[in-house]
Amino acid sequence: MEFQQIRSATAIVTYANTRFLIDPMFAPKDAMAPLEIGPNPTMRMPIHELPLSPEEIIKNSDAVIATHLHFDHFDEDACELLPKDMLIFCQDDKDGAQLRQWGFTNVTMLHHSGINFQGITLTKVGAMHGEPCRAEKLYEQIHMRGQACGVVFQAPGEPVFYMSGDTIYCDYVEAAIKEFKPDVVSVNACGASVNGYGHIIFDLNDMRALHALAPQVEVIVTHMDNVGHATVWRSDLKQLKQELSWDKLAIPEDGETLYYRA
């Protein structure tokens, strides 16, 4: 298995000789307006340029996995640049309908019972994209869907990989780790938050909880250093890694590739 960090939540996962493009955000640096209700209300996004051109990122991809369709996971540039017949796996019928409305013709739903693609079992896992009771109010106010998902990858000869997606530490995360016993877990860990509504993905306390639950698991942090509503940065995670002597925590830079065996 290979995990190439691209930028923010965008990554390329090569698994059982199949190349998955995860949550494509292709906008150039500073193309997006600041999120005024976030902790950095003047910071434009993305904060950094892509390490590769969109054409290089898309090239040879067998499928896209869209964990959800928020602006920092599937942006307008991705809509324009991805081939309209590209296979896209998405979380549910609502996202599927939106993707078809954008012109994509080859859309498949993920399922909690698992689906097979080229000998790989992809299993949808629940996610909690924000704090209970607070998140619902947030998404209603800003007129966005609050649903997101994670995905577990399984194939003979490959490590079990759990991609948790946009979630806080919650029962879904605990259950996925206990049920699937992943060898590798990726977490979106920039502690994104919205003023008055709390954090909506993993923050430092969530990372500590994950370490306490599964210190033996290889952990990759992604969704770092590129959105204005972040409260956690790679520098913070490097300090946490040192504090906890967390040897199995990987903090890849944009463009970096990590390699894992079963």
Image: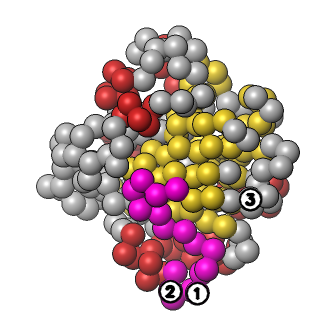
Q: Any mark on residue 242, and which?
A: 2
Q: Which residues are magenta?
A: 241-257
Q: Position of residue 220 (x, y in %)?
A: 56, 62
Q: Amino acid at mark 3?
A: Arg
Q: Amino acid at mark 1?
A: Ser
Determine the secondary structure under disc 2: helix
What residue is disc 1 on?
Answer: 245
Q: Position of residue 193 (x, y in %)?
A: 36, 58
Q: Position of residue 194 (x, y in %)?
A: 33, 55
Q: CA distance from mark 2 to mark 1?
A: 5 Å
**Does the rendering let one see residue 166?**
no
Mark 1, Cα crowd under 10 Å, few <14 / some 14-19 / many 20+, is: few
Determine the secondary structure under disc 1: loop
**Does the rendering let one see residue 122?**
yes
Report the front residue among 41 and 120: 120
Q: CA distance from mark 3 to mark 2?
A: 25 Å
Q: Are marks 2 and 1 in contact (CB under 8 Å)?
A: yes
Q: Is residue 33 left or right of 52 when viewed as pictured? A: left
Report the front residue among 234 and 16: 16
